[in-house]
Image (cartoon, rainbow, N blue to C red):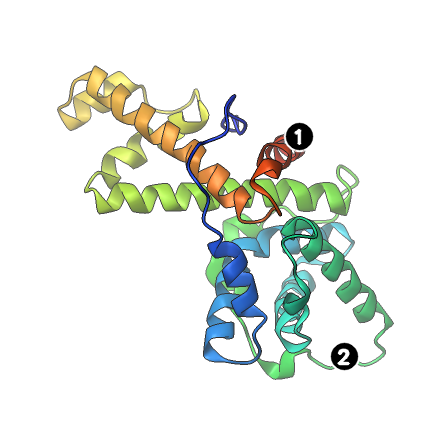
Amino acid sequence: MPPDLVPSDPSPQPFATTRWSLILDAGAGDSPTAMAALEELCRGYWVPIYAYVCRSGVAPDAAKDLTQQFFATLLEKQWLVRADRDRGRFRSFLLTYLKRFLSDERDRTAAKKRGGGKEILSLDELGSEEAAGFEPSAARTPECEYDRQWALSTLQNALTRLRAEAAASGAVELFEAVQGHLSHDDTSESLGAVARRFGLGESAVKMRLKRWRDRYQDLIRFEVAQTVPRIADVNEELRHLMAALMD
């Protein structure tokens, strides 16, 4: 079960705009800064892109190649320079250019590799388990699968940040033991069992879990806030992502 993505009250904390700064850096041409920024974007968003390509009827191996080529094309054609946070969601911007890219690819008669042979990031490095199960299916449209994987990537990005914070505080093993409870996973080890294993009181474990759960909500909102034009759009985007997860 996914976490509750939409708290009743918006967080009073201001949101940083580092994701949009990253997007602008990635569109700044063929420089080390742009390449590093594009690699980070690829790590954050490759799964929804790959899922969309697969749902469009492309075999998994070919979909990997096309996903790699798409990110290379973003840099080559400087499409990211056109990204404007005041004009809409980055999710929609990226999907628009993905469709344009796939249309261009279908029109190509030659099999020439895009991106000048440059590999932005090897998709094999990003977790084969995440890439599994994207064979073409009538269960979801490419757009629905894209949105669903975008939502899952948002949750995973927030969870990665949270785990890094737990590691920095020296509590990563406890975090991993209770991580399933962040999303109310009934199959997770009971908190009582976790407490006994770590020599802690159950109330102490519950308190730590509550803090992590609250922080997880903040980090999810942080991730979303960096991809929408205005802070006022965060809840609407969160509702859209929740619906995509339930589809």
Q: Position of residue 149 (x, y in %)?
A: 61, 44
Mark 2 crowd level (few <14, some 14–19, many ≥20, 10 Å Cα): few
Q: Which mark is residue 243?
A: 1
Residue 136 visible somewhere in the drawing: yes
Q: Residue 234 occupies which quadrant of the picture?
A: top right
Q: Residue at x 53, y 43 (%)?
A: 225
Secondary structure under tag 2 reads loop
Chain-order first, disc 2 or disc 1: 2
From this view, report whether residue 101 is shown above or below residue 50.
below
Q: Residue 205 occupies which quadrant of the picture?
A: top left
Q: Residue at x 76, y 79 (%)?
A: 111
Quarter of the image that includes the C terminus: top right
Identify the residue at the far left of this view.
Answer: 199
In this rendered view, identify the residue nearer to me: 210 or 84.
84
Residue 127 visible somewhere in the drawing: no
Q: Amino acid at mark 1?
A: Ala
Q: Residue at x 62, y 46 (%)?
A: 133
Q: Position of residue 9 (x, y in %)?
A: 50, 24
Q: Is residue 224 rendered to the left or right of residue 113?
A: left
How many numbered markers are drawn?
A: 2
Q: Is residue 191 rendered to the left or right of residue 186?
A: left
Q: Amino acid at mark 2?
A: Ala
Per the image, the residue denoted by label 2 is 111
From this view, report whether residue 98 is shown above or below residue 76.
above
Q: Residue at x 60, y 43 (%)?
A: 230
In this rendered view, identify the residue nearer to me: 33 or 64.
33
Q: Position of residue 101 (x, y in %)?
A: 76, 66
Front label number (2 vs 1): 1
From this view, report whether residue 132 is shown above or below residue 72.
above
Q: Position of residue 173 (x, y in %)?
A: 24, 38
